[in-house]
Image (spheres, rainbow, N blue to C red):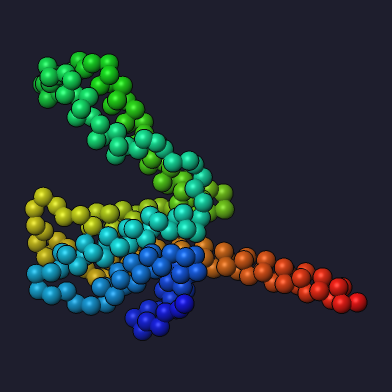
Amino acid sequence: MSVDEPRMNDRQVRIYNALLERDRSDLADMYRSALDLLATTALAGNERTRISYICHSMREVMNRVLSVVGTSPNPTIKPSAAVQVQALPDVVAQYPELNLDAESESVPVPQAVAAMFDKLVKTAIQEKRRSRDHVAALLTDDGNSDHAAVKRWVEARGFFVEWTHLEGRQRHQSELPGDGEIREHIEVFEELLDGVMTDFFALRHSIDDLLNEINAKVAEGGDE
C-alpha cells in the first residue's frame, strides 16, 4: 500500500509508507491527518481546536514511533507514576488529620504517605530518564541522551504535548502558535526520523540482497 497525497513531500511520503510497512497504519493515518489539518485553514473560532488536533496527532506519532522503529533500552516501569498518583487519595484519606497545606517549613506526615511520595518522585524521574534514553537509542549510535538530535526531538515533542491540552482559560488568538511554528516542529520530527528510517531500510535491503544472492547460489548448486 502506498499513498498518493499531493500535500505530502517526498520525505513525508517515505515516512508514511515506512509506517505502513511496519504494520502501523494507525500511526501513518494519524501523521497524515496532522499534515492534512495543517494544510487547511481553520474556520473562524476553530483555531485552538485545530491546533489541539494537530498536536495530539503528532504527540501520539512521536511517542509510538519509538517502539515501531527502535527498541527500548530499559524495561517499562511498573506501576507507572500515573497509576501511583491515582492511588494517593485513598492512602491520604486514611489520615484525616494530615494537613499538607500547613504554613510551616516542614510538615510531619505518616510513614506510609512519605513512602508513597518518595516512590512517586523516584518513578517520575526514572520515567523521564527512560523516555530520553529511548529517544537516544533511536537517534544515536551510542545512546547519548545529551546529543543535539535528542534535544531537538524532545523539544519538538514537548511543543506538541503543550498545545494538545486546553488550559484553564481560553487563549487569545494572538497567543496561539502559527502554522509556521507548528510546521517547524513537524519538520524536526521528519528530518530526524527520515534519517533513521533511511539507514534502517538501507540495511534491510542489503540483508535481503545478500540472502537472495545466497539462495541463488544454493539453487544453482542444486541444479548441477
Whether residue 144 is visible: no
Height in image: 79 above or below 205? above
| In-image side of 142 versus 3 (left or right) | right
Q: Nearer the viewer, residue 165 or 102?
A: 165
Find residue 111 and report its image quarter.
top left
Height in image: 15 above or below 3? above
Q: Nearer the viewer, residue 180 or 205?
A: 205
The residue under the point 43% across, 64% down is 24
The residue under the point 72% across, 68% down is 211
Image position, residue 53 (x, y; %): 23, 64
Image position, residue 108 (x, y; %): 20, 15
Image position, residue 163 (x, y; %): 22, 57
Quadrant where the C terminus is found in the figure: bottom right
Image position, residue 45 (x, y; %): 9, 69
Height in image: 41 above or below 172? below
The residue under the point 13% across, 69% down is 46
The residue under the point 23% across, 29% down is 88
Find residue 40 and report its image quarter.
bottom left
Height in image: 127 above or below 107? below
